[in-house]
Image (cartoon, rainbow, N blue to C red):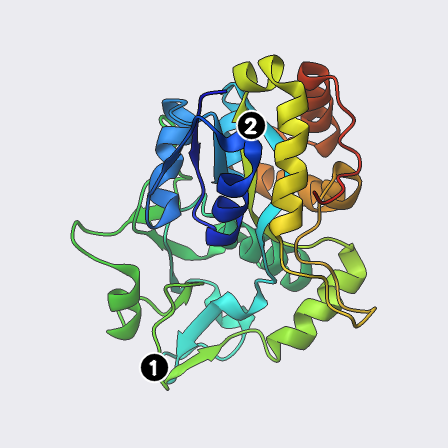
Amino acid sequence: MNASVVFGSATVATALREHPFATGFDFADVKPIHKAFPGVVNDLRYDVAELALVTFLQAYDAGRPLCLLPVTVLGRFQHHTLVTLDGAGVSTVDDLAGRRVGVRSWSQTTGVWVRGILADDHRLDPARVKWMVYESGHVAGAADPDFVTRAPAGATLPQDFLTGQIDAAIMGNELPGDERVRTIIPDPARAAAGWYGRVGAVPLNHMAVVTDAFAAANGDLVAEICRVIAGAAPAMPRVSSSPDLYPAGFDAVAASLDLAGRYAYEQGITSRPVTADEVQSKLEGLTGHDFGRVKSA
């Protein structure tokens, strides 16, 4: 079976490469992985790929022929990613109204989760913030809301953050190591635990997708790919109260998908809330497999 594959997760890529079904798979090496996402959703360049969840939701809403696989490649809580610098004049979430806040792109999954949390838990309407973005979204033709401003050419989010061009930012892996940085949501780990207790959802960042054509022609293979990816995830914590940040199967990811679908719609990224039920129905209809539960290979 020939297939074009791209994953930024080294553990997932290795697990797929080592499986017997990978004979004939052509693995692309794209770093950072989000640089591959436009090719995934606009050109259908890859048959099997890692993809940011909100990018999938936006692409699905726009009619791109892609299926979401219910396996998590990257999951993490997001409360710690909303940051400011000492002296920027931002002490609480309430101080963000009317202030300049940077995020890599409007449809970046981390940003969508954080803005949804701010709206639900802190009653902060995103339209009250002066958002600055540094990249376009991955889905061609998608537009940002009117209250979002594109940074000047050559500007970068970390540099603008450190030099005070913006008052706060949403940053994950790109967060600079600077002693002046502090989180805006107090005790973000405790806040994240409380949020999870209320909503019962894990903030999923990256999952896996296949093209509709690949799913329709390779139902058994798609099911096995899901099992391999699920098996490549980090082991669940032994503490029973700790959530699994790498859930697999639609039964386990449905709450997260539905919440992300609502957030994406409320933030003007999709034209409607995409639901877990419709995404599951499409995949199962094309493959002839039940993906409610996925057991690790």
Asked which secondary structure carries label 1, the reply is loop
Give amino acid for label 1.
Answer: Asp
The outermost residue toward the left is 154
Give amino acid for label 2.
Answer: Ser
Quadrant housing residue 45: top left
Q: Looking at the image, which is closer to me, 284 or 173?
A: 284
Going by the image, does 191 lie left or right of 184? right
Going by the image, does 71 lie left or right of 15? right
Residue drawn at 49 percent across, 47 percent down: 14
Q: Quadrant of the C terminus?
A: top right
Residue at the spot of label 2: 271
Asked which secondary structure carries label 2, the reply is loop
Going by the image, does 236 lie left or right of 128? right
Task: From the image, state whether disc 1 or disc 2 is nearer to you.
Answer: 1
> Badge 2: few (under 14), some or many (20 or more) residues near its Cα, within 10 Å?
few
In this rendering, the answer to whether 281 lies above or below 72 is above
Quadrant housing residue 248: top right
In this rendering, the answer to whether 51 lies above or below 203 is above
> Badge 1: few (under 14), some or many (20 or more) residues near its Cα, within 10 Å?
few
Q: How many marks?
A: 2
What's the distance in space between the residues labelled 1 and 2, CA to CA?
A: 39 Å
Residue at the spot of label 1: 178
Quadrant housing residue 188: bottom right
Residue 53 visible in the picture: no
For residue 239, the mark is: none
Please tell me which of labels 1 and 2 falls first in the chain: 1
Q: Looking at the image, which is closer to me, 74 or 12?
A: 12
The picture places residue 116, in percent across and down from the top left corner, at: 60, 52
The picture places residue 187, in percent across and down from the top left corner, at: 62, 80
Q: Looking at the image, which is closer to me, 57 or 252?
A: 252
The picture places residue 68, in percent across and down from the top left corner, at: 60, 31
Residue drawn at 31 percent across, 46 percent down: 135
